[in-house]
């Protein structure tokens, strides 16, 4: 299974970006999916998660109301719509996949519990 993240770039504070994560090697609906991010000098942090059919989503408090995770299983792609970007959102963003057996809710925010990771995509927000 391979994950490929894309869509990062340089934006000004207040602007928007949409990240994409394309999965190959297996159908996307096998996996719960998540986005994490890592800023320079900081540990990797959970951003958002979406269930296999997209019915359930979970967000970090820092992005709630500004970011939206979604998925199109027919296109094998997961998205992260990021609105009202702030300088503190600047980081490398990674997508991750959780396959069977699926983790319990309390484990969602720990990146060590995910099975597959993509290469990151850089998001830079200027103030």
Image (spheres, helix red, strand yellow):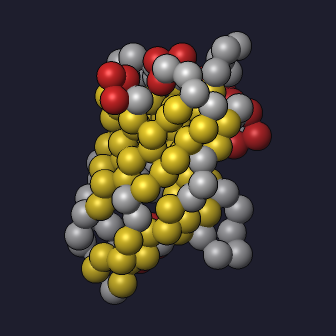
Relative to 83, say whether 118 is above or below: above
Relative to 84, say whether 72 is above or below: above
Look at the image and tell me whether residue 47 can be seen. Answer: no
Instruction: Compare residues 18 and 109 and report the one nearer the observer.
Output: 18
Q: Position of residue 16 (x, y in %)?
A: 25, 63
Instruction: Compare residues 104 and 19 and report the one nearer the observer.
Output: 19
Which residue is most to the right?
A: 112
Residue 110 location, quadrant:
top right
Relative to 56, say whether 126 is above or below: below
Left or right: 29, with 2 as reference point: left
Q: Position of residue 36 (x, y in %)?
A: 56, 50
Quarter occupied by the C terminus: bottom left
Residue beneath the point at 64% across and 75% down: 40
Residue beneath the point at 55% across and 65% down: 92
Relative to 114, say whether 94 is above or below: below
Q: Position of residue 39 (x, y in %)?
A: 60, 70
Left or right: 30, with 104 as reference point: left
Residue beneath the point at 50% across and 34% down: 23
Quarter occupied by the N terminus: top right
Which residue is most to the bottom?
A: 127
Look at the image and tell me whether residue 49 can be seen. Answer: yes
Q: Position of residue 108 (x, y in %)?
A: 62, 32
Residue beneath the point at 39% across and 17% down: 53
Residue 14 location, quadrant:
bottom left
């Amino acid at each position: 299974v391979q994950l490929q993240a894309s869509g990062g770039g340089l934006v000004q504070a207040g602007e928007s970006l949409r990240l994409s994560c394309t999965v190959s090697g297996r159908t996307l609906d096998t996996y719960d999916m998540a986005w994490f991010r890592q800023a320079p000098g900081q540990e990797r942090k959970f951003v958002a998660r979406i269930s296999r059919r997209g019915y359930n989503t979970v967000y970090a408090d820092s992005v709630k109301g500004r970011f939206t995770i979604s998925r199109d299983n027919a296109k094998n792609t997961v998205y992260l719509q990021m609105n009202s970007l702030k300088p503190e959102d600047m980081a490398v963003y990674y997508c991750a996949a959780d396959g069977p057996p699926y983790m319990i809710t309390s484990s969602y925010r720990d990146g060590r519990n995910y099975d597959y990771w993509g290469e990151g995509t850089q998001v830079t927000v200027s103030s």
